[in-house]
Amino acid sequence: MAQVNYKKVYERAARSGGWSKKQLDKTTKWGDFYELVKTKLQGTEVVLDIGTAEGNRFMGLSKHIKKGVGIDLEPGMIKLANRNKREAGITNITFKCLDADKLDFPPETFDVITVKHSPINFKDAFRALKPGGRFFTQQVAENDKWNLKKAFGRGQDYDRMPGTLLKLYKEQAGKAGFQKIKSRTSSIPHYFKSKQKLLDFFEKAPTIPEFGKHRKDYEILEKFIAKNRSPQGIKSNTARFFLEMSKPKY
């Protein structure tokens, strides 16, 4: 199976304006990570957002927290985040270019850590949380866009059994010291409104690695569209898993 070059994926996404171009996108639907986190906040928390990208979704929490720090490994994303922050007039959130595997913060700095679709170093996150602090993450499940991966015979986590990543994350979290680990999963229909929207998705997302470099990719795509076309659009699915956990109070 082709390996995903995440560095190139993130660089392309940054050049095209990030994942969520709309300022402070307030679209609410089941599975919206930041909307779920918002319901857990009291307004007094200091929050770290790992893999913040262009910052729009994280900034949607600005009125619900005391202070926030968003980090991302891609410099282009942090540049976008700082521009979006200035345009939105947000003053209680800062952005830093930082590797999630090397959290450069003093121990017990944050009340809450959030991670959406980004790698996690549970041990380092545990260290950065205050006692009693909470950790929330949403990740892409193996069966996300499953009919697409099946059509192409390859894709992100295509060779993993559904549930493998969730089990692995829960094990790593427990070993790091987290407790009260709760999880939920979802798989809901997703419709691409047009062929161009699907091509745009391939350009940004790592779901089908190196789309277009294989000789038959466009032939497979046309057959996929014909088979999955519906009045709502070209049908696939969005599959996610959500984890909530806490650091014990000493």
Image (cartoon, rainbow, N blue to C red):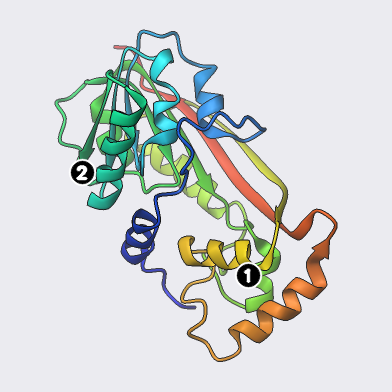
Per the model, the C-alpha gap separating discs 1 and 2 is: 32 Å
Give the total of numbered labels: 2
Depth check: give the residue in front, 248 or 239: 239
Can residue 126 be seen in this snapshot? yes
Q: Position of residue 97 (x, y in %)?
A: 20, 43
> Looking at the picture, which amino acid does disc 2 mark?
Cys
Please say if 79 is above or below 243: below
- Amino acid at dot 1: Lys
Residue 163 vertical placement versus 152 (above, below): above
The mark found on residue 97 in the picture is: 2
Where residue 228 sits, quadrant-wise, is bottom right
- Residue sitting at 22 percent across and 21 percent down? 109
Judging from the image, what secondary structure is the residue with disc 1 in? helix
Q: Quadrant of residue 95?
A: top left
Label ID, residue 83: none
The residue labelled by disc 1 is: 149
- Label whose residue precedes the other's in the sequence (1 or 2): 2
Residue 200: give x, y in percent of width and height. Answer: 54, 63
Tell me, yes or no, if residue 174 can be seen here.
no
